[in-house]
Amino acid sequence: TAVEFIHSATLLHDDVIDESKLRRGQDTANALWGNDASVLVGDFLFARAFELMVEAGDITVLGRLAFAAARITEGEIRQMAITGRPDTTEADYFDVIEGKTAVLFSAAAAAGIEITGAGAAHVEALRVYGMKLGMAFQIMDDALDYTASAAEMGKNAGDDFADQKITLPAIIAFQDGDAEERAFWQRTLGDAAFADGDLAAAQALLAKHDAVARSIAVADGFAEEAASALAPFMEDARTAPLAAALADAPRFAAARSS
């Protein structure tokens, strides 16, 4: 519950920052009730999350989730820092999505088993599993922004492009592009000097460099790393069936269409 409260608080704040009107096909809280209410409710959920962590009575788990909450904020700040910078490196992009997304997956997976008193090896296995799952999920989310319809995504297609967000497909296309193509990415993602037809032009450049498919391949790689991290549980007949089911989650995250 604490993890979900942190997650919900983050989404409330994200939608205010991004001025988003849709979240998974539903009107956002800020669209319905305004920014002030959304920020205050997000703050309340953060506070309740920490109350619940204290109630759990495990200082290690409290520290893990508190660290995750701090890293999420750092990740969002880093995302703001690379916004409008199409020359961002893949390493910087991975650092951003690890902080803003994957770290909470990781903390949730590790804390869930840690609070049962499991051994360090099993806690670490699930920490890595959650991190790789989160990376696969976010990369796929970023790839879908350029390919899925608004109905499939539950938000307006091309929002990341319009918001000058730097994601893996755009990074790949920029790195592989010639001078004219890089000038296009600088004018749009860099300078926000958008013109009619720019989203279609961006999609054409992504297709030229196979950037979306290459991004999905990266997500697939993280998904397989997540599945591999579950090896300690595969060795025990009692936990192997559950581990096999857990291994399907990152593969689904990297193969979904919405």
Image (cartoon, rainbow, N blue to C red):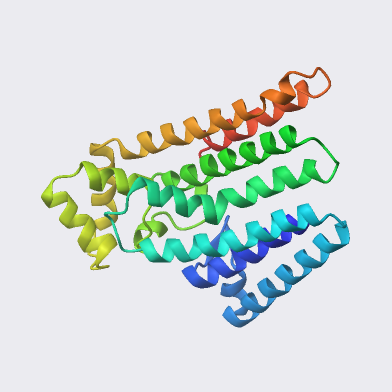
As drawn, the residue found furthest toward the left would be 179
Task: State the image quarter where residue 29 is shown.
Answer: bottom right
Q: Is residue 163 visible?
A: no
Query: Residue 4, percent across and down?
Result: 72, 56
Q: Nearer the viewer, residue 232 or 170?
A: 232
Query: Residue 95, percent across and down?
Result: 46, 51
Query: Residue 231, percent across and down?
Result: 67, 23
Q: Is residue 117 visible?
A: yes
Quarter placement of the N terminus:
bottom right
Which residue: 57% across, 48% down? 102
Q: How many marks?
A: 0
Q: Is residue 163 left or right of residue 257?
A: left
Query: Residue 118, percent across and down?
Result: 82, 37
Residue 183 to residue 129: above or below: below
As drawn, the residue found furthest toward the bottom would be 36
Which residue: 56% across, 73% down? 31
Which residue: 50% across, 57% down? 155
Q: Is residue 175 left or right of residue 226?
A: left
Residue 252 to residue 54: above or below: above
Which residue: 19% across, 56% down? 184
Residue 193 to residue 153: above or below: below
Q: Nearer the viewer, residue 163 or 148?
A: 163
Residue 57 to residue 42: above or below: above
